[in-house]
Structure formats: C-alpha cells, structure tokens
Image: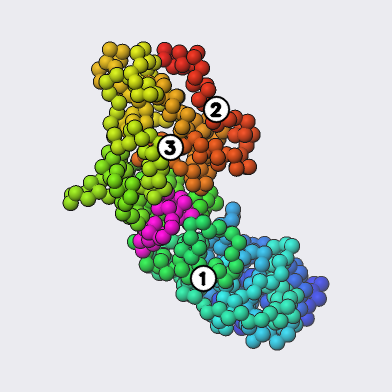
Amino acid sequence: MAKSLPAIPGNTFPQLPLTVPHAAFEPALSLLSRLAARGGASSMQRFCGDIAFPIDPLFRGEGIAIEQLAQLAGCDVAALERVSVRHLGKGHFRLRDEFASLQSFQRLRVRVCPECVRAESPSAAESWRVPRRLQWKFSSIRSCPEHGCMLVSLPPEKFSKDARDFSAQLRKHYVWVVDQPMIPAGHSPFEQYLTDRILRGRGDRWIDRLELNVVSRACEVLGLRIAKGPDASLAGHREADWRSFGALGYDVLRSGPVALSDCLAAMAREAGVDGRFFGRLFGPWTTWLKSRSLGDEFEPLRDVVRCHIFDHFSVRRGVLVLGVPSEGKAALNAQKPFPLNGFAKRNAEDLVHRGLAQCQADGSIVLLGFVTQRMLEAYEREKKFFPARKGSGASVGGGVQGADGTEVEGEAHLSISSVAHALRVTAKTVGYLVENGLLHGTDVSELYRRGATVVTADSLMQFRAIFISLGELADVAQRPQGALSMRLRNADVALLAMPHDLSRIYWREDVCAYMATEQQYSAPMRTFSLADMPRCSFLNPELLDMVLSGRG
C-alpha cells in the first residue's frame, strides 16, 4: 500500500507516493534511508527532521519506532521487526533470539555487491531502488550468493550516522561502485549457513545453540589455525583468506564438540609441532579464546576446549586454563612417538629410572609423551658432561664425596629444604637431582632425623656453576617466571632432562649465550652477570654459615 508524505508546515518535499516496497531481507534503517532518497531528501536525518520522525529510537531498534516506520511505509510490522537489529547497549545487539557484538558488524564501512547495484539501480538518482541486505552488515559474510562475487566496501565515513544512511552512501559513491570489477567468489557453506540463520533463524544442532557472534568468529579463527599453523597471527589477512578460514572452521564445528576435540588432537600429531604445551600448539585459537573482550556467551565453546586440554595435557594444579584452574591431573600429551636409537637406546634403562620412559608389558621401553628429541639431546649432553656418573642412576651413599671423588672429612652439609631455597626449586626437584647423581647426597642420621638425605655444599657449588634454575633467573632478571619460560622456550634454550612436574633448570652457558644476543631485555637483565652472580653469592662464607645454621 502506497502512502504520501504527511503535510507538515515547511516541508519542501513534493507530495509523491512512497512506492518503496519492503524486501524480506531489508532492515528498518535501510527502508527509512530509501524512503528519504525516494522523497528527494539529501539525507535520512534531514528527511526525519522534516516529517518529525524520531530517528534515534530507530537507531536503537526500539519496537515502537519500527512500528511507526512500518505505518509510514505501509509494510508489515512483524516482517520489518524480524530483520531489524536492536542495540542493547555496551556493544551488544540482538536480532530476534540471536545475540551479537560489535565485532559481528561492519559499522563504519558499508558493503555492497556491485552486480546487485548494476542490476537494480540504473543511475545514482535511483539509488533508492537498491535495498540493503541484512546479511551484508555482518563481518563474516563477504560474498553475494546471487552473483557469486565478493562484496566491496565503500570508502569509510568520518561519522557513523553517515554510514547508516545506505541510499545516500550509494548515491555518493555510485560511480565508484559500478566501476568495481567483479571478483568471482562462490558462496561458501559457512556463509550460506550464516545467511540462513540470520534470515530464517537457528536450528537444533550444537553449532546452532552457540550464539551468532560466537559461531561466526570461532569458525574463522579455528580455520586460521588449521590453515596457517600454530605461529599464525590473528591480524594481517585478506578478506578472501578469512573466507577460506571460515569455511575450514565450519567444516569442523558443524559436526559438534567431538569433531572439535578430534581436530585439536590432530593438531598435536602434525609434523614439526611441539605437542607438549597447548598454548603454543593451538596458537591463535588459544590466544583468541583467552581474550578478555569475549563475553559469557563464549563459555560453551571454551568448555569444550578446556575439557580437551584437561584430558590430553598435563597442567600443573592451580594453573588457569581459559579461566578455570587445573586440578593437576597428569595426562599424556598427544604427539607422534619416535623410536629409541643410538645413545638413548643404549641408556634405555636409565631413561626409565629418570622418569623419561616406561617399560611396556612386552618388555619394550617407550618414551613418555612429554619427552622430545630436544630433551634426549640434553640428556646425552648431560651424560657426556658427567662421565663418572654415566648410567649410575643411584644417589651417592656412604661417605661424603668431594669434587675429585675422594671422601672429605668435615664436609659441610645442607638439608634438602636449604638447597631448594638456594636453587629456587621445589624439594621434589632436589630429591630428583640427588637420586640421579647431579647433586652429591648422603644419609647422615647422626645430624638429622633417621633416613634424612643431605647435600654437600661442594656439589651444590659445582651444580650452580653449570646450571641455573628458572627461579634464580627470575630473581636476577626481575621478571615473572612464566614470561621468562616462554622466551627461553621460543629461543629453544635447552632444559635439563627431567619429568614435566619438576622445576625447570637450564644449562648456564646456554642462557648466557642467549642473553648475549638478546637485545630486548630490561636493564636488570643486562646489569647482572648470570655467569657469576648466583655462584659468587653462595660462596660468601657468611651466607653459607647462615644457610647451614638455618638463619638464611
């Protein structure tokens, strides 16, 4: 039904019938913009001012404003309300029962299909003939299914209110739009799914129960990780690339949470990736899920990923995994097994004793899931550095031994707790070092409680001359241990070969070599000498006396 502009004093527009039919996919703002252009107004704001139509409530998507617009245009209220977006405040929006966020929309950039404009608008003066498709507003829909081409973004506007005036934008940039070449791009299943969901509503599958903004971005980021690997960045990709990423991610997520878990497990089996640490393995996927900008609507997706991590990765108790602390359950990290050969094969039994391998029921020895080739190289280096203890696998017993292997009378002893405090490691780690001959230990029942193990001060000084713990390094650098650990791991600095639940210890010369080439550390890292500071402070007689007496 056609209507005429109301007769309002001062109205300069001709009394023309408003023959602007509402399209099934056209939101309220597009219809109002076309009404303004059809009436000859220079802008939607000017048109609303002249007919005394409240435009701000319509910007917010309020029901009363949509009903008034439907009466003005002579269209069905329910149909117009069905495809209109309501602003909930603080960057949140609602489309019927769908929830969306600012990232879901193109706010300052208007997307159009050049072929649709050529077909529906013969000139700039008749730009009102082209209704804006609701799906064009969504960031993850980048192609037109009718013409099989990429959408183009109009030049940006300084003010968002100008970008809302679709017909005025189209009239302003009409020549530029029709001159754009057609870039072929088939409508992907992912874009088709989003289009159907936007226009028709959600279904009953697991992916349908996720909010619209969760699905749209999750498919793209998961596809990015699948296509580009764990080192990919979340920025710097073309629109065509994001289309392909979205299609890859949708192929996984549409099959449900089991398919997502299987996909994450397959990432750990990829050649050349480090499958021990989920943050590094999943790369941009984990980075995105940890973002503080994601709201509670992302929790169902996070929960699936979090359960997979708890089931497949060993995470220390209390460590937050996507906002939930770990219970510290051990799990074998999924990664490709590699056979024992060479030096590792000849020392297979010692690897079992060291907690790096286990003996199977058939008698074969296999490495545990967290052991990498780099760790085996560190193990071989350690054994060659300590040839006297090669394959010993036992703590030093009987008398206390000096540096040359002879018994030393009156040798200073340190308790396990004192050594742990000096090395900035756990007592469990010290026990492991003693048990495997890296520290000299002895049972001195006359000085300590029965069965207590002590460590000689000389062996501790020798150990600190060769190794440095992550805790010591953090004290020197005045940096958190987590940040330092990530830097050293990314630089491939070798760890002392030990089980994953013990403190991290590095070869001192490797750390010093890395620090010599690292130019981005803060002043405390450059002013201290890592080779001398911890060792010299421990050699101080007063400090040694304090440790021995329990005052340090």
Q: In terms of sequence position, does the residue under pointer 2 or pointer 3 come before the other?
A: 3
Q: How is the image coloured?
A: rainbow
Query: Crowdedness of circle 1 by 10 Å Cα count: few (<14), some, many (20+)?
Result: some
Residue drawn at x 45%, y 66% as measured from the top left:
249
Q: In terms of sequence position, does the residue under pointer 3 or pointer 1 come before the other?
A: 1
Q: Is residue 230 above or below residue 496?
A: below
Q: Callout 2: helix, strand or loop?
A: loop
Q: Amino acid at mark 2?
A: Asp
99 sits to left or right of 402:
right
Q: What is the count of numbered marks? A: 3
Instruction: Give whichever of 343, 254 is nearer the camera.
Output: 343
Q: Which residues are magenta?
A: 259-286
Instruction: Give whichever of 198, 430 is nearer the camera.
Output: 430
Q: Residue furthest left?
A: 362
Q: Quadrant of the N terminus?
A: bottom right
Are dots 3 and 1 in contact, CB under 8 Å? no
Are dots 2 and 3 in contact, CB under 8 Å? no
Q: Amino acid at mark 1?
A: Ser
Using the image, tell me which numbered label, if any, was put on residue 244.
Answer: 1
By secondary structure, the bulk of the magenta-drawn segment is best described as helix
